Amino acid sequence: MARLKKRSILLAGHATSVALEPAFWAALEDLASDRGLSLSALVTEIDLARGDQGLASSCRLAVLDHLIAQQRP
C-alpha cells in the first residue's frame, strides 16, 4: 500500500493539512485541471460540500465520483 503524502491546502484563508495516497493527489490534480481550477479551489469546493465527512475521505470520493461519471455514456 502506498504511503500517505501530506499536503498543506489553503481553505477559506486558513491552512490545513490533508493526507492522501499519491495516486489520489494525482487524480485530484487531473480533475482540477479538467475543470480549470487550482488544486486548492477544487479542495475548497469539496470541503464546502462534505458535511460531517472527513476531508480526506471526501477527496477520495470526489475522485471516485469523477471516474464513475467518465464511464457513463
Image: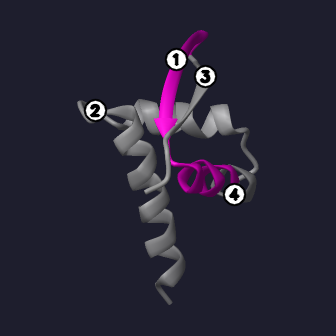
Q: Which residue is mark 4?
A: 30
Crowdedness near tag 4: few (<14), some (14–19) or many (≥20) residues, C-alpha within 10 Å: some
**CA–CA distance between discs 2 and 1?**
17 Å
Task: Looking at the picture, tell me which residue is in the foreground, 19 or 70.
Answer: 19
Q: Tell which circle, 2 or 1, labels the residue nearer the N-terminal end.
A: 1
**CA–CA distance between discs 1 and 3?**
5 Å
* Of the two numbered discs 3 and 2 in the rendering, the one whose residue sits closer to the viewer: 3
- Badges 3 and 2: C-beta atoms under 8 Å apart? no
Crowdedness near tag 2: few (<14), some (14–19) or many (≥20) residues, C-alpha within 10 Å: few
- Badges 4 and 2: C-beta atoms under 8 Å apart? no
Please tell me whether residue 3 is drawn above or below residue 13 in the rendered image: below
The type of residue carrying mark 1 is Thr
The type of residue carrying mark 3 is Ser
In the rendered structure, find residue 51 and report the number of the disc placed on it: 2
Please tell me whether residue 56 is drawn above or below residue 32 in the rendered image: above
Q: Is residue 3 left or right of residue 15?
A: left
Q: Is residue 72 left or right of residue 34?
A: left
* Of the two numbered discs 3 and 4 in the rendering, the one whose residue sits closer to the viewer: 3
- Badges 2 and 1: C-beta atoms under 8 Å apart? no
